[in-house]
Amino acid sequence: MWIAVAGLLSLLPFLGQTRDLASREVRHAQIAREMAASGDFVVPTVLGREYPDKPPVMHAAVAMIYKIAGRHSMGLARLPSVVAAILGAMALYGIGLALDGRRTGLVAAFGLLGVAGYAHMARVARPDMIYTAAILVSCFGFVRGLRRLPRRQPLWIALAGFGCAVATVSKGPLGLIFPLMFAGLAPVRRLDLRWPRRSEWALFAAVVMATAAVWVVPAYMHDDGAYLKSVITQPDLDLDPETRGHPFWWYLPQIVGGFLPLTLLLPLVAMDLRERRYLAAVLMATAMVVVLSCLTKKRVHYLLPVYPFLALAAAEAVHRFSERLAMLRWAQGLIALSLVGGPVYYGLIQPRLQPGEDPQFEYARKVLQCVGPEGRVLCYGTVGEAVAFLAEKQTVTPWATTGDLQNALRQAGSPAWVALPDEAIGELAKAINADARPQDAFPDEVADGRKLNRLHLYRVTHNLR
């Protein structure tokens, strides 16, 4: 209960702020809006086009919230991430309780809620937090189901399979790999834990397949597997070693910053590891970082599942050294400050650092003011996602190439509004056969141009044939 209360008090205040929008956050919020409007919870779309990058686990949850609330907003879109963050902290408490006792579990759970990288993603409308919470639920199921008790506990193994399936469907195969790694590492040097039996592996696999089938089967029936194929072959899953990326060690400095303020406890973890030689939480976190470092594509938010196990290792170290070094009260004060840090930042500091809205929403609002209540706007790139999210009756059509724009202009008729940045003005010039350099405005008989910071808005006034 106290973990839930601490999570709500730390993460809910100022959840609807629009001064700072994370990458692709508006896209996911708009996908959920289209899902709520269409009633199709199987195949997500953005601006009417299928979106294969992420299955609709988070989008379906947000769409249900939109329907219940009767409206959409960034605060509502972020709510599933908050709930998932709290559930993840609860699952970590259960893991710590089973491995090292109640006090360790509590320190780990409360500490995780205040970790900078974890708390930030808990306030972002992206599927990463649901993916991380599902991994923790799966690990919790394993650590409870693999205890050496007189009778077996198949329900815990089933819970492990359920969490594993949700994580895998949410964000890919690492949702399967990480829980399996935990099932192999947790029982090492533990007399109270064992490795799964064959019957338990069979139950685990059956639950994983049954849970995944809830989405996979309807998605396959939607178009005979074409959408599922696009999900599996998407560029985000490209493991081509020829692709250039960050160096292998790139995640190490990212961990130092993302794990603040508990980074200050890492020396204790090193001392604990030196004395005990083996710590399941440390080995699990290390193995996860190694796996992530081997992947071609590296992103800061990929570290999100690592933070809970580092928090557990820090909590174990605090527990072991609390009497010798009087660390418990110091760690409790550090965690308390981290829990109030989010509301203080978003309520007092951020409004002064960023008094206006995020540029995405600022541009979108200006576009909608120019277009009017019934206008049609053709948007280049990701600009249209913010415009569509804030729009009421306006029609938003995306385009990326000259051919896309020409087709969209023919369908829209005259007049039509075209929103684009500097680098795409040449595409508009080609589409309407007008000569113009990026710094020029189009002739009056072709378009009326308005410059909105780095974004341009043109009102095309002639018909294309």
Image (cartoon, rainbow, N blue to C red):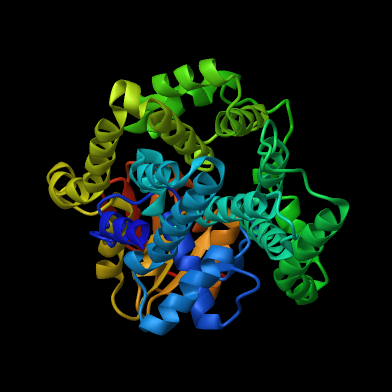
Q: Position of residue 460 (x, y in %)?
A: 39, 65
Please state, as top left, top right, bottom left or bottom right, where the C terminus lies in the image: bottom right
Measured along the vertical axis of the image, is residue 332 above or below residue 202?
Answer: above
Q: Residue at x 55, y 29 (%)?
A: 282
User: 270 and 285: which one is in front?
Assistant: 270
In front of the other: 131 or 381: 131
Q: Nearer the viewer, residue 127 or 29?
A: 127
The residue positioned 48% from the left and 44% from the top of the image is 101
Residue at the right extreme? 198
Q: Quadrant of residue 200?
A: bottom right
Instruction: Give the vertical position of 72 relative to 14 (above or below).
Output: below
Relative image position of residue 260 (x, y in whole percent): 34, 32
Asked if residue 158 lies left or right of residue 29, the reply is: right
In the picture shown, does residue 90 fall above or below 255? Answer: below
Q: Is residue 230 above or below residue 195?
A: below
Q: Which quadrant, please, contains the N terminus? A: bottom left
Residue furthest front as drawn: 150
Residue 350 coordinates in the image, percent (x, y): 18, 46
Q: Is residue 135 left or right of residue 421?
A: right
Whether residue 412 can be seen here: no
Count of labels in the image? 0
Answer left or right for 204 relative to 126. Answer: right
Residue 441 point in image, percent of width and height = 31, 50
Horizontal arrangement in the rendering, residue 38 relative to residue 395 (left or right): right
Q: Residue at x 20, y 45 (%)?
A: 345
- Can you see residue 186? yes
Residue 265 location, quadrant: top left
